[in-house]
Amino acid sequence: FKVDHLIINLPSESKRLRFLDINLNLTPFKPSDHKILEENKSLINDVIISTASTMEPNELNTVSGKILLESRLRKNINAKLERDIVKDIYFTNYVVQ
């Protein structure tokens, strides 16, 4: 399931604007779950924005930070949908500015 391109503002202690530019795909556990993802597209976008915007740019700019974001996104999306639907998350574009 392809999620729309997102640009997310990140907290920054400097005056410089920091953001995360991402494209990602969600892999459901079952092919039938694709419909549930489509119906909850705006909820999924909201979870992605709220989860990523709480992380620091320096944290997101590391491999461990990217893995942590992926884990948090999977957990938070499944929690909002109230069942385990998202199995994996694949980033097709991931830029921290």
Image: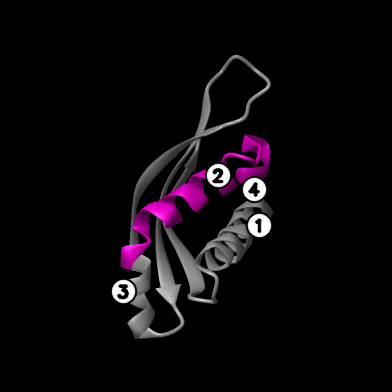
Question: Which residue was labeled with disc 2?
Answer: 50
Residue 93 in sight in this render: no
- The boundaries of the magenta stretch are 38-60
Say left or right for 47 vs 54: left
Q: Position of residue 26 (x, y in %)?
A: 42, 67
Q: Between disc 2 and disc 3, whose residue precedes?
A: 3
- Amino acid carrying label 2: it is Ser
Residue at 54% x, 75% y: name it: 83
- Here the colouring is one colour
Mark 2 residue crowding within 10 angstroms, few (<14) / some (14–19) / many (20+): some
Residue at 45% x, 64% y: name it: 90
Eyeballing the image, is 91 above or below 33?
above
- Amino acid carrying label 1: it is Leu
The quarter holding residue 10 reads top right
Q: Between disc 4 and disc 1, whose residue precedes?
A: 4
Q: CA distance from mark 4 to mark 3?
A: 33 Å
Question: Which residue was labeled with disc 4?
Answer: 62
Classify mark 2: helix, strand or loop: helix
Marks counted in the figure total 4
Classify mark 1: helix, strand or loop: helix
Q: CA distance from mark 1 to mark 3?
A: 27 Å
Eyeballing the image, is 86 above or below 96?
below
Q: Where, quadrant-wise, is the N terminus in this rendering?
A: bottom left
Q: Between disc 1 and disc 3, whose residue precedes?
A: 3
- Amino acid carrying label 3: it is Lys
Q: CA distance from mark 2 to mark 3?
A: 23 Å
